[in-house]
Image (tube, helix red, strand yellow):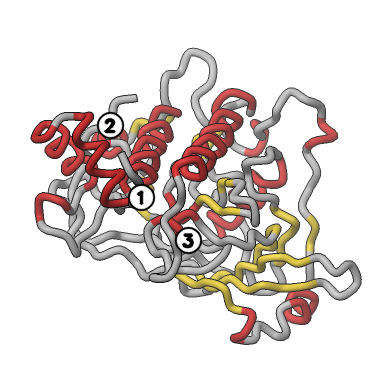
Amino acid sequence: MSCFPCFSSHDKKASKKGKNSNSSGSGPIPTAAPPPPRSQPQPENPGKIPTEATNNKGVNNKPTTGEGDNKNIAAQTFTFRELATATKNFRQECLVGEGGFGRVYKGRFEKTGQVVAVKQLDRNGLQGNREFLVEVLMLSLLHHPNLVNLIGYCADGDQRLLVYEYMPLGSLEDHLLDPPSDQAPLDWSTRMKIALHAARGLEYLHDKANPPVIYRDLKSSNILLDKEFNAKLSDFGLAKLGPTGDNSHVSSRVMGTYGYCAPEYQRSGQLTVKSDVYSFGVVLLELITGRRAIDTTRRNEEQNLLSWNQYSRNQVGSQNWLIQFFKETLNQKV
């Protein structure tokens, strides 16, 4: 895998979010350089859900796994009253995260005792009806141990809510980039375990789904962790069906998050599964260094993780760079 600088950002990363949440905004990325502050997709008319899948292939080319139609189980539908009851009327004490899309609450269904995460989309927020529909369709059809499980959704009136399995340890970002001051750094084996699980999730989307699915939003805040640090990919609002047949790519409006977006995709709008592989390389570098892809609180030469990585390796050599990392980040003897 070849990782090289994409671009710098002058926009400070969004504040930390909680469990089953997404802390850095995703949206259209302008192709001019240097990029202006992050632009986000505008919300669409919340009154009606579109009836077609938002990708280049349409609803007739739904992704499958070749393992039988019994895997393609539609998500449950919930009423707004059911979800309000489960979250104690969306009480503050149940709030576990929030961002540009809305808020995430921890909920519990009284009849079954099932604990869930309920994402209530902001009607004036960044995730519109189109992204809502894409996420429902994708996660209803795609099932894998390293993809977050969509339990159901609510589309009562202008309310848009998604119900997921609850991931008690929150996101990789919470433990790697925004850990509490009294929390020890993630050990090396846990970091590699998370990387392996994320890679398996991508492999499923790219190689097992037919047609392939391009995630488009792989980042540390979208990797959720269960109580044993098993990792699952979440937030499929930007996912898109990949190329089929003799096509080498699909053309798409450039979407994603600064620091994780593949530079060739940013320049051309030509999307392939390699765009996800590039993003995985950035996340892997975050796991190795404990640094953000873009961090405007650091010195100019250290704000872009990929640029800093290349500069540091050239200055001190690969072996010395790793030794310095283990000493400063993991506090381990070398």
Quadrant of the snapshot with the C terminus: top left
Residue sitting at x 68%, y 40%: 145
Q: Is residue 86 above or below residue 26?
A: below
Give the label on residue 3, or none. 2
Q: CA distance from mark 2 to mark 3?
A: 24 Å
Q: CA distance from mark 1 to mark 2?
A: 23 Å
User: Which residue was labeled with disc 1?
Assistant: 330
Label 3 crowd bin: few (<14), some (14–19), many (20+), radius 10 Å: many
Circles 1 and 3: CB atoms closer than 8 Å: no
Query: Which is closer to the viewer, label 2 or label 3?
Result: 2
Helix, strand or loop status at disc 3? loop
Residue 114 location, quadrant: bottom right
Q: CA distance from mark 1 to mark 3?
A: 25 Å
Helix, strand or loop status at disc 1? helix
Residue 105, position as x, y percentages in the image = 63, 73
Label 1 crowd bin: few (<14), some (14–19), many (20+), radius 10 Å: some
Q: Is residue 298 above or below residue 236?
A: below
Front-most of residues 152 and 221: 221
| Amino acid residing under circle 3 | Asn
Residue sitting at x 58%, y 57%: 132
Residue 3, position as x, y percentages in the image = 28, 31
